Image (cartoon, rainbow, N blue to C red):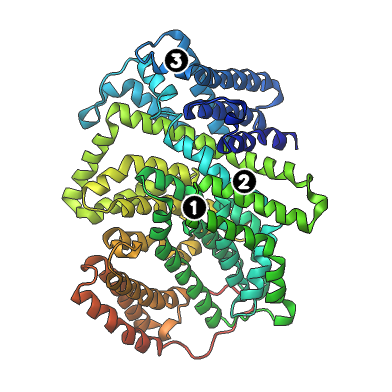
Amino acid sequence: MKRRYLAAVLPVLGILWMLDAENWIGQVYITEQYLGVIIGVTVLIGLLTQPLPDAFRFFDYALGITACLSWFWLSWNYEQWLLEATSRGPEKWIPAMIAILGTLEATRRHCGLVLAILGVAFLAYGFLGWMAPGIFEAAYLSPARFLLYIYNDSNGVPGLVLNVVSTQILGFIVFGAVLNAVGGSAALTQLALATMGHRRGGPAKVAILASSLFGTLSGSTVANVMSTGVVTIPMMKKAGFPARYAAAIEAVASNGGQIAPPVMGATAFVIAEFLQVAYTDVVLAALLPAVFYYYLLYRQVDRYSAANGLVGEPRENLPLLRTSLINSWPLIAPLGVLMWFLFHLGYSPGKAALYSAAAAYVLHVIRDPGDFLRVIPKILGNSGTTLIPILLVGAIAGIVIGTINVTGLGFALTLALGHIAEFGGVLALLATTAIIAIILGVGMPTTGVYVIVATLLAPALVRHGIGLMSAHLFIFYFGLLSMLTPPVAVASYSAASIANSDMWQTGVTGVRLGVVAYLLPFVFALNPALLMDGTWIEIGISCLTIVVSGFLLAEVLASRNAYGGGAMRVVAAIVSLAVGASSAILEPGSTPEIVIALASVPAAWAISRFSPSQPVVQTPAQEPTP
């Protein structure tokens, strides 16, 4: 409990900064000064909330306090240092060294060894890159110059990513914590039950709806799994879904929450800042891929349920839709406030989220006046606990971006990937980027994966003809897919622990259920019409090909008896992939694409007539193979 209260300092600092509290006392501070304070406090709290064994507790306090004071030293002197850029004395580089060391250790404890090692590797390249061979040889920098660039330059740690995290993302984390504290997760589950519980395979469809809605706000796939999965996974198992299938559905649905507008797990704000576009542009571009993601997942669940005789819950056992809507007004109204501030009034995302959080809190207090003060420590504590690893990711991202900028590593990587494109074409370049994103994503938060891979690889994609928005969303998708891809499928394994299912089987099933997320990025990378970049005809025809492709593919993946099994199932799979690929291969809106799209509709209808008319009924104890 004390640790949670300690972490509550972070959202308080962020809220005061976004509400311009310094003006209340007649002061003006530079953004980098605020960033120095918040990362210093984060490092101190991070080390104290994940302490070493008691025998080494002194080390936590010593490193935490000195690192925190070193970041504070940056904030205190920042204005003066702007005028002394060429001065690199020990009064600067010694605090820089302590501050970065403390940040790396806090990152290791909260974000895992992978991200900490990545930060160390980039620092090592900055110091020693001038000794690297070939195109990776970097310009020589004195150790003090490189260290201070990372420490106090706006392209280093106190830079773009940390700024976005400590303002925009912080606001949405507070908003999500408020909704959760006032019963938002339970309200979403009740609403999903009332809407989907009676349908075929109802509990699985409840999981899809609840996890998609909660996931876009939570900002964490694993947190989403652990929040909604404890309710939905037992429901699915009770309805007859095998344990591995129930866990995989929850994992895939929860993971999709981070690609679903309007919030997209907060990474949308980082993408907008990277591209220097309006946040609404990112939301609009991400809309159709998210719809197709959930369309294919929903249809797979529906066809699996049909093939295995899995029915929904009786209506009398479910909450009434009208009652659920009434009970959800403290949740729905703040979301309406959020949309109003974001899209109508044009407020910054962070401030819009804070005002929406205030609306949710006020509505809850009206309904339950006894919670006037009791819920505040919970909100701030949960927000702070969530913020610690994300702020540390922002700091490590600053190390990566700073090293790339000052050494020229980004140019070298662009050249290296360019050679891949020369030999294998753009498709090989995309495949290489996807593999790198998945590998780097192992054990790292989604925002961190996106920032690092986008900084390293996006320029190469853009240089070889991939659109700017397409390149960044492509990287975002595959960074997120590390959560589902074995052997380290964190989301699937978290769900498997709730379902008591085999982790490897759950991971493989999750890949099958989330197959559209592996295929669709290649399509929209080559066809920007799927990102709303094109004429209405181009967008409509491209969408039609994806819908038909998903319609056929879902049943192929859902059951071995699909389309009568055997040769017809193979035909359906080939037609599905060919129709989907046509959207990427052919010119958007061209005559061949239009012909294929229109011809695919009757073809899909004809193939669907081969589906088995009677389900093969399974009992909960059986493990049907999809």
Residue bearing mark 3: 80
Closer-to-camera residue (262/587): 262
**Where is residue 4 shown, x and y percent of the image?**
70, 37
Residue bearing mark 1: 483
Residue at 37%, 29% (x, y): give it. Answer: 402
Which amino acid type is marked by label 3? Gln
Which amino acid type is marked by label 2? Val
Closer-to-camera residue (9/305): 9
Q: Is residue 493 above or below residue 153?
A: below
Closer-to-camera residue (579/53): 579
Nearer-N-terminus badge (1/3): 3
Q: Residues within 10 Å of mark 2 (few under 14, many from 20)?
A: many
Residue at 69%, 75% (x, y): give it. Answer: 322
Q: Quadrant of residue 160?
A: top left
Residue bearing mark 2: 174
Secondary structure of the residue carrying numbered label 1: loop
Q: Quadrant of residue 126?
A: top left
| Horizontal relation, residue 563 to residue 538: left or right | right
Q: Please state, as top left, top right, bottom left or bottom right, where the N terminus lies in the image.
A: top right
Secondary structure of the residue carrying numbered label 3: helix
Q: Can residue 268 be seen in this snapshot?
A: yes
Nearer-N-terminus badge (2/1): 2
